[in-house]
Image: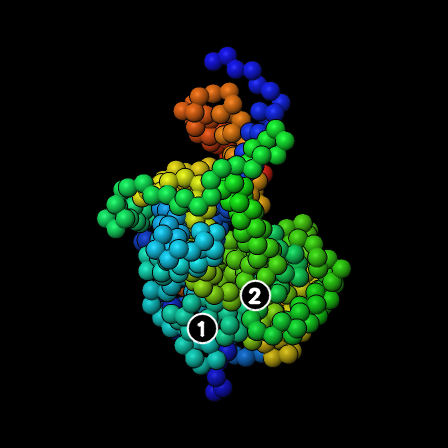
Amino acid sequence: MNVVITPVMIGQVIISGILVGTLYSMVALGLALIFGVMRVINVAHGPLLMLGAYATYFLYSAFGLNPYLTVPITMLLLFVVGVVLQRTLVFRVVGAPELASLLLTFGISIALVNLAQLAFTSDLRAVEYLTGSYIVGPFAFSKSRLIAFVFAAAVSGLAFLFLQRTKLGKAIRATSQSREVAMVCGIDVDRIHLFTFGLATALAAAGGALIAVIVAIQPEMGGVWTFKSFLVIVLGGAGNYPGALLGGMLLGLVEQLASLFLTTQLSEVVAYLLLVLVLLVRPTGLFGGRQT
Amino acid sequence: MATAALEIEGLRKSFGGVLAVNGVSLRLEPGRIYGLIGPNGSGKTTLFNCITGLERRDEGRVFFNGQPIDGLKPYQIARQGIGRTFQVIRVFPELTALENLLVVTQGDRAAAMERALELLRFVKLEGLKGEFAGNLSYGQQKLVEFVRMLMRDPSLILLDEPAAGVNRTLLNDLLDAVRRLRDQGKTVLLVEHDMKVVMGLCETVFVLDHGEKIAEGSPGAIQMDERVIEAYFGR
């Protein structure tokens, strides 16, 4: 390929990187919360995002709701799904060796994907609501991506404020800093776990809802989101919530920049190489994670 | 006989094939300071964990103010009024000193805030209330952990090696605080390796060895007990 790379192109990929990175940050914050509070790596995080995407799709196609108005509804629905999953299944593996929680959430993931295939078929479905781009000077902003960015930034910001400022948010952080101590101090950690899993699932669902307006959805769309979220929390440092937000942004930028220089297939590889590199050089994450 | 603050009957806990606590019974009268001593690995911390619900006992019963508490969850036990500190200090490092205290409470926020500030003043840490606990010195973290444990105004206080890694001045402050809590009618059980602390503070001492209670009595009597000397100096 002999392509001349202009400053405008670089500006464009940086914008695209930030837009998509914010979405990564929001979704990954959910995975980071579950890992931080329960030491559970939730392989079903992506499939739960997929359920969120379908929720928005059906609310849009069956009830004619504005897909952006469905975001809070979808989040609420999936919050409940998360709480039910935690209450019935996931609580059994909290505190168990990591392999147990990996196996369980992997099982949940397979079940969700297959149920979705049965219920929704494998057909691609799209929420065709907002297409085209806004043109500002030499730059183009895809409308659906720009609005997804605004929603993701707002939702992440609110989630972050909630963790920093509210009593429940602080109890969640205390539990993630030391579960045993939280228990002995009288914090009802089972309740904290329920709420955390619900909140994390709602964050994934918000991602699904926004993605449904950007690309066509299908039952297997979640896997790559589990992986990317995992990558983001490795980048950001496990259990480091601001790190997850920065890590998402970094992943978005790296992917987009790589796409400038490499073919689409190769640029996907860059993210995975980044994971290997970070694990080799700085396994506690670029922004300093907690040793456990 | 009045109701015991804490009564343990035939407590047994094993990990795999290792009997960590083997049929221990003990009784704490309210408003007194008790010591729990024994060589490393004699089951002291496991006993604490069984009382506070962190470990599930295999056999035996635990009564707090006459009510059974074995089988309850740790947070339920804490809310009934048992406070505990850890051998290795455990503050919430990424919460501020003040948040460390506030986060463990329920209900009335204004009252919690007032109590938290009062407790921080009590250990002279009011000026550092906004500092992340992880940035405080070891001794300051120990104090934060200590007053966090007091937030719920527990009637039974379990201290796991309060003297470890603490300088003399701070230690004397801590011991004074423990005596004052006893004078307020609270019951204290402390695990401690520093014999001077145990002898100076405790009214009754229990000695564990290999998970069994081998002696119980006043500090003076314990020091003369042959089984205790044997447990500490070999047989």
Q: Residue at x 46, y 71 (%)?
A: B76
Asked if B184 appears above or below B76 in the picture, the reply is below
- The residue sitting at the left extreme is A118
**Image disc number at residue A225:** none
> Which SS class for mark 1?
strand
Residue B150, picture quadrant: bottom right
Q: Looking at the image, can residue A264 be seen?
A: yes
Residue B188 x/y as whole percent = 57, 71
Mark 1 and mark 2 lie on one chain; the one further toward the N terminus is 1
Q: Nearer the viewer, residue A89 or B19?
A: A89
Q: Is residue A77 left or right of residue A107?
A: right
- Asked if badge 1 and badge 2 are on a common chain, one would say yes
Which residue does the numbered mark 1 point to in the structure image? Answer: B26
Classify A260 as above or below B45: above
To which residue does mark 2 refer?
B104
Residue shown at 50%/69% (left/top)? Answer: B78
- Compared with residue A261, is residue A43 higher up or lower down, i.e. above or below? below
Q: Chain of mark 1?
A: B
Q: Residue at x 66, y 61 (%)?
A: B98
Q: Position of residue B200 (x, y in %)?
A: 64, 67
Q: State the separation of the CA atoms marked 1 and 2.
A: 29 Å
